[in-house]
Image: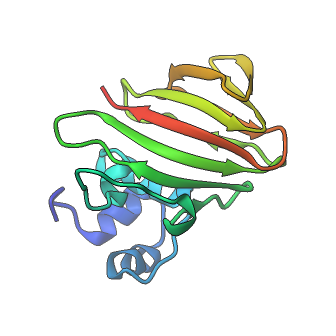
Amino acid sequence: MRANLSLSEVARRAGIGKSTMSGLEAGTGNPSVETMWALAAALDIPLARLLDPPQHEVALLHTKDLPSLPSNTSNYAATLLSASPANARRDVYFIQAEPGQPRDSQPHPVGTVEHVILGQGAARIEVLGDSYELHVGDYLTYPGDQPHKFTALKPDTTVVFIVESR
């Protein structure tokens, strides 16, 4: 409603079925991370605005207790840890991934920068024609407004992604 778009138009822009969109709007759907990114892109908003949990002054979050968005195409799940407040522009995600099919990401809105900190395992990120291998404690930043690919190289790989919208 805030975007002044019908359910049908949002579904069309996101490339998803109207029935899927209707289920999501009713709170009965179980969307993948790809579906949620497509909806965010269709609405021209950061993904975290669709997932934003209530804010508290002090909060200890246990990822096992939070909802996560699984991928339809790879063994990958994203859990929103912290959405950007209205006066800031960053969203923090905890990622759990297993070796196998890479997670291909389409470009996010212009000006998006991603920051990655590898917590456990190993991973490869491909962006701008280069490939970067990350090990525990490594930090990588890159333009998220370009196509990029994430591949877990070891079992039980965990990563913190910070998506910065400029």
Percent across and percent down for residue 34 are 55, 55
Residue drawn at x 67%, y 44% is: 158
Q: Is residue 89 above or below residue 52?
A: above
Q: Is residue 149 above or below residue 80?
A: above
Residue nearer the viewer, 56 or 116: 56
Residue drawn at x 36%, y 23% is: 111
Percent across and percent down for residue 16 are 48, 65
Quadrant for the N terminus, please.
bottom left
Residue nearer the viewer, 111 or 21: 111
Q: How many marks?
A: 0
Q: Quadrant of residue 11?
A: bottom left
Q: How is the image coloured?
A: rainbow
Q: Quadrant of residue 138?
A: top right
Residue drawn at x 66%, y 51% is: 96
Residue nearer the viewer, 97 or 144: 97
22 left or right of 58 in image? right
